Image (tube, grey):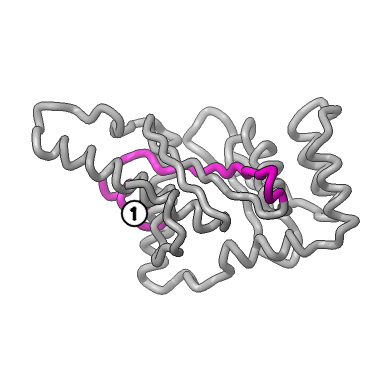
Amino acid sequence: MDSTKQTTKLDGDFLKELRDYCVCHEIPLPTISIDILKHQDSPDAPEFVACCSVASIVRFGKSINKGDAVQRAAVEMLAAISNEVHKVQGDCTKPPKEVPKTSDGLESERRMKFKTYRELTDTGIVDSEGLRLCDRHKYFNHLYPSLKEAAFKVIRSDEYASSKDKALSLLLALKITPSIRLLKSTSNEPLMCIELNCDLDVVLVALESEIFDQVINYLSNMLV
């Protein structure tokens, strides 16, 4: 199945289905990254390439719409891991090759948090009709041109000593004041939470060594 070649928009939240599938089968949760392809013939109409990873499996989705690219990558991943799981269930003597279960503390913690959120969403305690990803993208994309220009100047710069310095300078350029705190975690490395104090609820949580790179990547994608 090659969903990247399809032009019709996919119906349904396949990323949600993929996460649910991973939780149910005790598979590591998926991670998503986005790249932008600009063509020489049409530089103003870039294509988005979403990379979806689950354990050692990697699948891609491509579209002129960022959210659609993510959905297509999720569809490809669902097809790949469900096929692998069915193979394992058909022959219990053979362990899975690409989707191993994990006992890693951090992965277990991520799965537990996601499962808790899904349970709250299903019971109606959490409002699942909240702000869409495309609305968040529009918010950052429609910031004042002067703010975006200052932000991209920081993003393109290689003069910063650390990703922390770069991320904080990027937020300063956008006139966003972050709230930063450490969270309790079962991992040896501290888990950090960064909340962006702006008109939207934006909260990023990751290991201390990764969080500032995630801030830079998140804003780089949202500002495009």
- Type of amino acid under label 1: Asp
Look at the picture and state if 114 lies above or below 144: above
State left or right for residue 191 relative to residue 87.
right
Range covered by the magenta-colored residues: 16-43
Of residues 181 and 41, which is closer to you in this image?
A: 41
Of residues 223 and 16, which is closer to you in this image?
A: 223
Q: Position of residue 166 (x, y in %)?
A: 79, 36
State left or right for residue 56 relative to residue 190.
left
Q: Is residue 22 magenta?
A: yes
Of residues 57 and 31, which is closer to you in this image?
A: 57
Q: Is residue 221 magenta?
A: no
Q: Position of residue 15 (x, y in %)?
A: 42, 54
Task: Report the residue at 38% width, 30% height from top.
Answer: 56
Task: Report the residue at 86% width, 41% height from top.
Answer: 153
Task: Report the residue at 81% width, 45% height from top.
Answer: 152
Q: Residue furthest right?
A: 146
Q: In which image quadrant can residue 118 be found? A: bottom left
Task: Say if residue 95 shows up in the picture.
Answer: yes
